Amino acid sequence: MKVTVKQLVNNAMAEIETISLEDAKAALDDENTVIIDIRDIRELYRGGKIPGATHAPRGMLEFWADPESEYHRDVFSSGKKLALYCAKSHRSALATQALQNMGLESICHIDGGFEAWTNADLPTEEVPKK
């Protein structure tokens, strides 16, 4: 293997903005920030999500972000700051870097991800199965 996942994540972390749990919690009340959960839907069903977070599965993220894609979602062209998270902040680091490379400028990810969020006893909400 020429490049390990750890190296990919470390490279991404050097290029992206990481916000603290405190800043992420404050973003819950910021109408100019959208928190994006990129985890698999099964992870949301098992453990819930950050209140008000928008689910955008990692596998569709670039397609949802691209305004020229048939799968585009308006939240990605809203002009609001996007704060991504996953379980531990590895996938969200790579996802943030990918979206940044696509040209999104107001984007970051949450340090420690959902695991750190729940370990800090911050609020969560259930995601009911559809």
Image (spheres, rainbow, N blue to C red):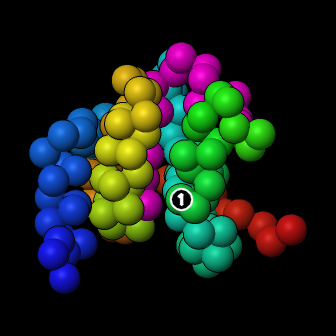
Numbered range of the magenta stretch: 72-86
- In the image, 68 versus 129, the foreground residue is 68
Q: Looking at the image, is 52 positioned above or below residue 92? A: above
Asked which quadrant contains residue 96, the reply is: top left
Quadrant where the N terminus sits is: bottom left
Place of residue 24 in the rendered image (x, y in percent of width and height, measured from the top left): 37, 39
Place of residue 54 in the rendered image (x, y in percent of width and height, measured from the top left): 63, 45
**Does residue 88 belong to the magenta stretch?**
no
Name which residue lies at 44% across and 46% down: 84
Left or right of 61: which side holds 87? left
Left or right of 80: which side holds 20? left
Left or right of 64: which side holds 97? left
Asked which quadrant contains residue 90, the reply is: bottom left
Q: Residue furthest front?
A: 2
Q: Which residue is mark 1?
A: 58
Q: Amino acid at mark 1?
A: Arg
Place of residue 105 in the rendered image (x, y in percent of width and height, measured from the top left): 37, 23
**Does residue 81 belong to the magenta stretch?**
yes
**Residue 68 seen by the camera:** yes
Quadrant where the C terminus sits is: bottom right
- State the SS at label 1: helix
**Residue 83 seen by the camera:** no
Q: Residue furthest right?
A: 130
Q: Looking at the image, is 52 positioned above or below residue 85? A: above
Q: Residues within 10 Å of mark 1 (few under 14, many from 20)?
A: some
